[in-house]
Image: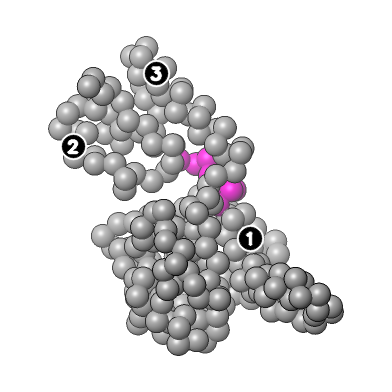
Amino acid sequence: MDLRLIVNPAAGYNNIDIEAAQARGVPVCTSPGYNAASVAEGAIMMMLMLVRRVHEQQEVFRQQGGIGLPFGLQLHGKTLGIIGMGRIGVRLAKTAEAIGMKVTGLTSSSTRAELEALLQTADIVSLHCSLTPKTHGLIGLTELQMMKKGAFIVNYARADVIQKQALTDALMSGHLGGAGLDVHWVEPADPSDEIYQHPNVIATPHTGVASLEVLEQLVSVVCNNIVRRREGKELLHRLC
């Protein structure tokens, strides 16, 4: 097989063996910067579904009851802690502030003390960091127990930023109010898994980026790099 180019239609590249590509002289490119609005909107959607207990409202509706009963909380006035202030994190912060949320954020250079302060003060923690040796398993039982009782966590980063068993335990104990998961430890995820059976977990099939507008842009980026490779031009967003 004459492999001449690898273009990942996403910003991440943890699914590509960079060393193997380098050893074979195959250039690797990503497609960053096109998914910020879509993922930020997805995170807001997930937060709203969690805090307003949409799954419970749907069940009550099917039973033809509950008219006018209060369900859940509002986002306005709540504190959002964003772990990962790249393009997506910044876009999410602006959107959340427009809703009336208070926002704190961490970057890759933030300290452990700053992480602990965020966890202790946030009503909702939203993950948007890259998966690196530093962030792998970043959120474990110790970190989850630092969060307010009844707080929520949303993950649109990579599943392994959170330790699965720790999250399961924090949910089962009732310490967390709920979790919104768009990324999973095994994909496709098994819906019968204990964590997805929890009534306060909302899971989506890694579709945070998958709006029609974003997919159209990504196809254009990928095709552009294929043409550039064929014509000997400089590749865009090249990693190696």
Q: Which residues are magenta?
A: 31-39
Could you give the CA–CA distance between mark 2 and mark 1, rounded to whole angstroms? 38 Å
Residue at position x 36%, y 64% in the image? 161
Could you give the CA–CA distance between mark 2 and mark 3, rounded to whole angstroms? 22 Å
Mark nearest the camera among 2 and 3 is: 2
Residue type at tag 3? Arg
Residue at position x 55%, y 36% in the image? 215
Which residue matches tag 3? 228
11 shown above or below 95: above
Q: Nearer the viewer, residue 80 or 69?
A: 69
Give the class, few, some or many, for how many residues have Cα within 10 Å of label 1's Cα (few <14, many ≥20).
few
Which residue matches tag 2? 20
> Which structural element holds mark 1?
helix
Q: Nearer the viewer, residue 40 or 200?
A: 200
Residue type at tag 2? Ala
Residue type at tag 1? Met
Which residue matches tag 1? 45
Q: Residue 36: within the magenta?
A: yes
Residue at position x 66%, y 64% in the image? 97
Q: Residue 205: within the magenta?
A: no
Q: Reading the chain from its start, which is encountered first: label 2 or label 1?
A: 2
> Which structural element holds mark 3?
helix
Mark nearest the camera among 3 and 1 is: 1
Residue at position x 50%, y 41% in the image? 33
The answer to whether residue 180 of the structure is visible from this angle is yes
| Marks 2 & 1, CB-CB < 8 Å contact | no
